[in-house]
Image (cartoon, helix red, strand yellow):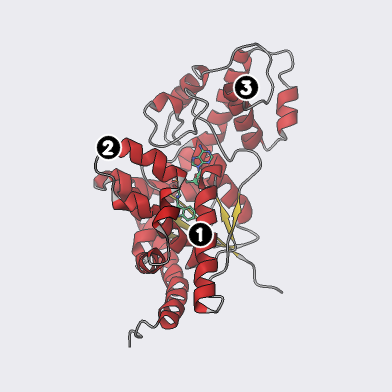
Amino acid sequence: MTTPQTILSGIQPTNQITLGNYLGALKNWVKLQQQYRCYFAVVDLHSLVTARGGGELAANSWYALATYLAAGINPAQACLFVQSHIAAHCELAWILNCFTWMGELGRMTQFKDKSVKEGANIPAGLFNYPVLMAADILLYQAALVPVGEDQRQHLELTRTLAQRLNKHCGQPLFKVPAPYIAPVGAKIMDLRYPHIKMSKTATHADGVIFLSDDADTISRKIKRATTDSGRDISYDPDNKPGVSNLLVMQAVLLDLPLAEVCSRYQEQSYGKLKSDTADVVVAALRDIQGKINTLLADRTSLRRILDTGSAQAQATAQQTLNRVRDTLGLLPLT
Ligand code: TYM
């Protein structure tokens, strides 16, 4: 029997997890966990860049862990851990920083977009963010990284760094990872402004469905979603981004081909599309929300899952880090 390949992915516990995170990432993790050796991290150090920490970060980290489990990640199959618990992430990030060019980081779209919002004091962490992400992935020798469309560029940089280090050191220190980006659902759009992606840090909470939203809030947000001019319902993200977004939500949540969902709305109104989409989202999240609350009420069990995951993650990460340290001539620890 061949050893399964490794997957690694993570979600930042900045604010609460959104429907975009669920459909673009988490739902795929659940599907993939049976075939791969999986590492799923709560990437709290990445959150520090913009959220600046505090009690809210801690609460969101527990919430993220509970959400992974409630969505169907099985801790007996996948290793669950918190990024900041494994010091090797920061150590490898520093090493990779020494092999990353300023120009490469300056070209990252997310850096360009987010730095505008930061005003005069742009945190250096925002600039170096993709290097820490590369360290997250490369430490575990991940072959595949299931993410949404917005992470494609970061993955490209990760691949470049893996190849650069492998070449510099004259040996395959790192597996060169590939992104896993689902053909449908990899870019869920904001309900209010359907030309931008749904984001945890959106200016208007009405455009974002948080996994913690109750049924009434979800229905209200979807029923008020911006739709497009014209009356026909078709999948056309360029000209009908609002309508297309709702069709995609249904297709992913119902596990149906987009064409089949579209065919249901041949002679239907936007109102019907919205109310059906609201029903589908509410029904899909109801079960997850119930489980999140139960899991959060039992911190001891969550802690146990983290302890097991951390020990496993620590062993794998340290193995890679030690090889990198040796190869680069850093003196052995003992
Ligand atoms: P984050 O926390 O912003 O997003 C987590 C995951 O959700 C996906 N996503 C979306 N997918 C579809 N539609 C959307 N509107 C949407 N918004 C977000 C993201 O693509 C991501 O897969 N840098 C990462 C976190 C990270 C990471 C890693 C990921 C840190 N280290 C290592 C993979 C591997 C991020 O910002 O995620």
Is 289 placed above or below 273 here?
below
Q: Nearer the viewer, residue 301 or 39?
A: 39
Disc 1 crowd, CA 10 A, few/some/many (<14, 14-19, 20+):
many
Dividing the picture into quadrants, the one containing residue 267 is top right
Task: First in sequence, mark 3 or 1: give its number.
Answer: 1
Left/right of residue 235 with respect to residue 217 in the rendered view = right
Give the number of callouts.
3
Regarding residue 333, the answer to whether it shows in the image is yes
Task: First in sequence, mark 1 or 2: give its number.
Answer: 2
Cα–Cα span, label 2 and label 3 = 33 Å
**Residue at coordinates 43% horizontally, 31% vertically from top-left?**
213
- Nearer the camera: disc 2 or disc 3: 2
User: In the rendering, which numbered label is found on residue 119?
Assistant: 2
- Residue linked to disc 3: 239
The amino acid type found where label 2 is placed reads: Gly
**Residue at coordinates 59% horizontally, 26% vertically from top-left?**
246
- Residue linked to disc 1: 158
Is there a contact, CB below 8 Å, between mark 1 and mark 2? Answer: no
**Residue at coordinates 50% horizontally, 36% vertically from top-left?**
19
